Every structure is written in structure tokens, then in C-alpha cells.
Amino acid sequence: MAKGLIDLLLDNIFDDAWTGKYGEMLTANELGWAKLFGKRGKTLRNVYLPAKEGETSELDVIYITQKGIFIFESKNFSGWIFGDEKSRQWTASLPNGYKNHFYNPIMQNRTHLKWMHKFVGDDIPLFSIVVFSERCELKKISVYSEDVKVIKRDRVYATIREYWEKNPDVVSSEKINELYENLKKFCNVDEAVKAAHIQNIEEKYKDEEVKVKLDIPGDISTADNRVSQEIKCPICGKELILRTAKKGGNAGKKFYGCSGYPNCRYIQNL
């Protein structure tokens, strides 16, 4: 399958950070259908939840409802997606033969649920939903846990409705408001918190060997998407890609970014 117009726009006009945030916004927007049809709740994005020893865990989208808290891990990928709940690495396979290996999003979201439980207690049910873009195809995904869903974005409402019909009301309106206000303070954090979050990830994974082979076809070595075979990411071990900043004060400047983005956000300035 060839890339469509939206894929090309996202790849060539916008940078990776914008594309990832755009995917999270679309996932949050899908929750509007849930609210419209009576599955009401409060939505928060980019929640930097406190974790162990001063670290933070970044949750893409959460939806606080009378059934519990839905925690969404958003992946704005294209191509064919292959993955198993028990495997550490998943794969996105693109039409040109390029294969991007990324950290298992179920495991990633399981960590988010762990710290959310620490914060809200065990009495509030948590639901894990991994959301991929409609631009991809979930070719072969194996999920064994009943409380985990891996879906495309256009199935967000249907998935919430399924949980809604199977689970009792356990969270009062007052408690929903309380949870919302308590969690809201972890959104829109300053740059120091975001920098500390990235630094903690770097420290956590700098000594860990993640040996992932990327299959890079010979016809994609363009100026701004060229993969350096000599420079490896110090966090996850994947190749660094030469990119050009498209927005902000660094627009036009080149830098090396990890090919594992957005799961790994390491950059190396030139």
C-alpha cells in the first residue's frame, strides 16, 4: 500500500513532535463521541504523573468516568503493525520495505497504569487502550489480557461503549471532579519537568542493550531521512536519523533524532 496524501503531509510538512501531538489530539477528539452518546467523562492530555524517586510517567490521554479511568497510549504510525503482548518489541512495516521496531505499547501503558494506581488507589478501575492511527493496518496483533485493548482510532467510541456495558458505575460525580482537579495539575508542566522526564529516561536506559536490526532499503537515503549506520542512540541503541527542524527557534537547523521516536526522544545537535 502506497502512502496517501495525509501521510505525505505529515511526513514532509510537519516534524515528528507535531505529528505525535496531533495523534494525541485526534484520540482526545474521538472521546467527544463518547460524551455525545452519554458516556460522559473528563479528558486530560499529556499528564506527567509522579513516579519513583522523582521520575515522571507521561500519559498521552486519560478519560475519567463513572466506570473508572481510561488510559490511552496513542501511536500515530503508518504501515502494517505487528506485535504480541508478551514481546518487548513491535514492528511497523512500511510499503518501501523499511521496518521500524518500537517498544511494546502494551508494556508502556502498563507502566502508566502502575503509577496511576499508586496515585488514585486500587479502588478506581483502570482500563488500558492502545490507539493506532487509521492510516495503519493492525496486521497481526496478539493480546491475551481481557483488560487491554489495541485498536485503531476510529474504534475509540465503540471500545468505550463495550467497557461501559460490562462494568458497573463505581465513581461518583464528586469523585470524578476531585480526580480531574488532582490530575490536572500534572498537565501543562514547564520545560524543566519535561527535560527532567527525558533525562530520567536517558539515565534509565543508557546501560541497557537493545539490539534491534532495522531493515533499511537502499533507495531511501535522502538528505533529511538518511539513517546514519555509524551513529547509534545512547538510550535504546537504534540508529540516529539526520533531520531538519521545521518549527520554532531552531527551524532550518539539522540534528540527529532517534529512529525510535516517539518512544525514544533522544536528539543530538550538530
Image (cartoon, rainbow, N blue to C red):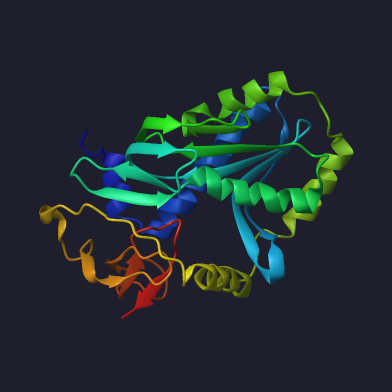
Q: Nearer the viewer, residue 139 or 18?
A: 139
Vertical comparison of 259 with 84: above or below: below
- Percent x, y of residue 108: 54, 50
Q: Residue at x 11, y 55 (%)?
A: 218
Q: Residue at x 66, y 25 (%)?
A: 163
Vertical comparison of 103 with 145: above or below: below
* Quadrant of the rendering where the C terminus is positioned: bottom left
- Percent x, y of residue 253: 31, 75
55 to the left or right of 77: right
Q: Quadrant of residue 265?
A: bottom left
Q: How many marks?
A: 0
Task: Inspect this view and state whether residue 245 appears.
Answer: no
Specify the farthest residue to the top: 165
10 to the left or right of 48: left
Specify the farthest residue to the left: 219
- Percent x, y of residue 136: 35, 36
- Percent x, y of residue 192: 61, 75
203 to the left or right of 136: right
Vertical comparison of 198 with 72: above or below: below
254 to the left or right of 146: left
Q: Residue at x 33, y 56 (%)?
A: 212
* Quadrant of the rendering where the N terminus is positioned: top left
Specify the farthest residue to the bottom: 270
Q: Nearer the viewer, residue 209 or 181?
A: 209
Task: Inspect this view and state whether residue 147 appears.
Answer: yes
